[in-house]
Amino acid sequence: MSVTAPSEAREQYLYLTRLAWSLRLLGADVVLELGTAVPVVAVRRGPGDRLRVTAVVWSGRWVYAWGRGRRRWADADESAARVIMRAAR
């Protein structure tokens, strides 16, 4: 589930930027963290607590993933921001 090729890294950046903007439009406090080993959109949950979401290629499609487990991902589409907002609560 890692991103290695430069073109994939650019795609990942675009997906994360779109997600950050969509979450912001829904009222979330977000930060796009690019200086980390794995770029993420960090969604504020409370003081000092953020849900970190990354974009990865999984089974040939882009998804957003956070944490561990089968229910901690969403297809990288228009509905993803709402799914992630629910997860951040």
Image: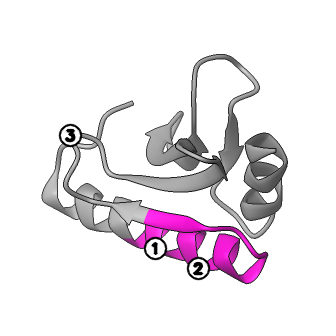
Residue at image position (34%, 66%) is: 13
Horizontal side, residue 34 vs residue 66: left or right: left
Pointer 2 residue: 21
Q: Which residue shows up at 55% across the image and 66% down it?
A: 30
State if disc 2 and disc 1 touch (CB < 8 Å). Answer: yes
22 or 30: which is nearer to us? Answer: 30
The C terminus - image quarter: top right
Q: Secondary structure at mark 3?
A: loop
The magenta stretch is: 14-31
- Which quarter of the figure has residue 26? bottom right
Q: Is residue 83 above or below residue 17?
A: above
The furthest residue to the left = 6
Sort mark 1 into few (<14), some (14-19) or many (20+) by Cα contacts within 10 Å.
some
- Residue under label 3: 37
Give the position of the N terminus as an image quadrant.
top left
Q: Position of residue 41 (x, y in %)?
A: 48, 57
**Disc 2 element:** helix
Q: Which mark is residue 17?
A: 1
